[in-house]
Image (cartoon, helix red, strand yellow):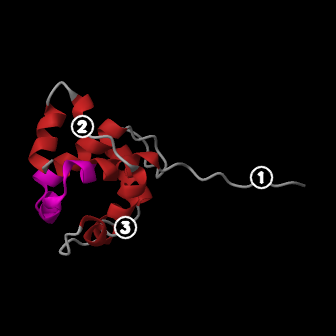
Amino acid sequence: MSLALASALLGAPAFAQTPAGDALRGKALFDNPAQASGNNGLMTCSSCHGSVEARRATISQNTGGAYDPYANIEFGTAMTRLVAALQGQQAMAAFRVLTAQQVSDIAAYRRTRRRPILPTRRN
């Protein structure tokens, strides 16, 4: 499924037709999209966006929330923002080769990052 089809699905009322994302595949794509997608010309996402937590904080802030690297980002929000960036940002043009499944996987990874559980101190 191409990015154009993914975009059409996002604009259609049947949002449920968007492929389910797999966060493990999404992590591999975020960390090394060239290797994970087989498209050797792709840079890592972190080369421009930093960590996935930094990206989540920016999404949270840009959608009316606090700058929080562990904000609760819904899958639909992550998917919509990613597709909009792929379509509208020239710097993201190289990533338009990703399939709808791969885009969905990256969105799932961005959505599933959780606040770390810190050990409690015992006195």
Say which residue appears at 24% left-offset and 41% top-offset. 80
Residue type, label 3: Asp
Q: Which mark is residue 120?
A: 1
In this rendered view, identify the residue nearer to me: 43 or 73: 43
Numbered disc in front, either 1 or 3: 3
In this rendered view, identify the residue nearer to me: 95 or 40: 40
> Mainly helix, strand or loop, the magenta region?
helix
To which residue does mark 2 refer?
A: 18
Say which residue appears at 38% left-offset and 49% top-offset. 22
Q: Residues within 10 Å of mark 1 (few under 14, many from 20)?
A: few
Question: Considering only vertical position in the picture, is 38 above or below 53?
Answer: below
Give the magenta range. Answer: 86-103
Q: Which mark is residue 31?
A: 3
Q: Residues within 10 Å of mark 3 (few under 14, many from 20)?
A: some
Upstream in the sequence, badge 2 or badge 1?
A: 2
Image coordinates for residue 100, horizontal then vertical, percent = 20, 48
